[in-house]
Image (cartoon, rainbow, N blue to C red):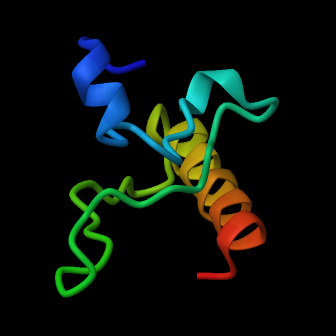
Amino acid sequence: MPPRPMMKDQGYGSGYVYDHDTEEGVSGQDYFPDAMGRQQYYTPKGAGREKPIADWLREIAALRQKKTGA
């Protein structure tokens, strides 16, 4: 929700989907500039305590692919 009525009138936040409002907790939206593309800042090794993190990141990627086709 825009913090000011004027911002709402100007379309601020239009089309934004809050991840936590979706059933899966992932909206699939990308907020990086188109020219930049999606960045990956962390790649868990998939062993020990990092295994559930790696699994969840794969699930998120699959949900994003399903929702956006990208």
**Is residue 10 shown left or right of residue 57?**
left
Quarter assignment of residue 35? bottom left
Percent x, y of residue 38? 32, 72
Identify whether 41 is placed above or below 50.
below
Quick one: 32 or 10, which is closer to the camera? 10
Percent x, y of residue 60? 62, 52
> Where, quadrant-wise, is the C terminus in this rendering?
bottom right
Q: How many marks?
A: 0
Q: Residue at x 31, y 15 (%)?
A: 5
**Is residue 65 shown left or right of residue 12?**
right
Identify whether 47 is placed above or below 25.
below
Percent x, y of residue 55? 64, 49
Percent x, y of residue 64? 64, 62
> Where, quadrant-wise, is the N terminus in this rendering?
top left
Quarter assignment of residue 33? bottom left
Quick one: 28 or 50, which is closer to the camera? 28
Q: Residue at x 36, y 27 (%)?
A: 8
Quick one: 11 or 52, which is closer to the camera? 11
Quarter assignment of residue 31? bottom left
Quick one: 21 or 49, which is closer to the camera? 21
**Residue sticking out furthest to the bottom:** 35
Q: Residue at x 47, y 31 (%)?
A: 49
**Is residue 66 shown left or right of residue 3?**
right
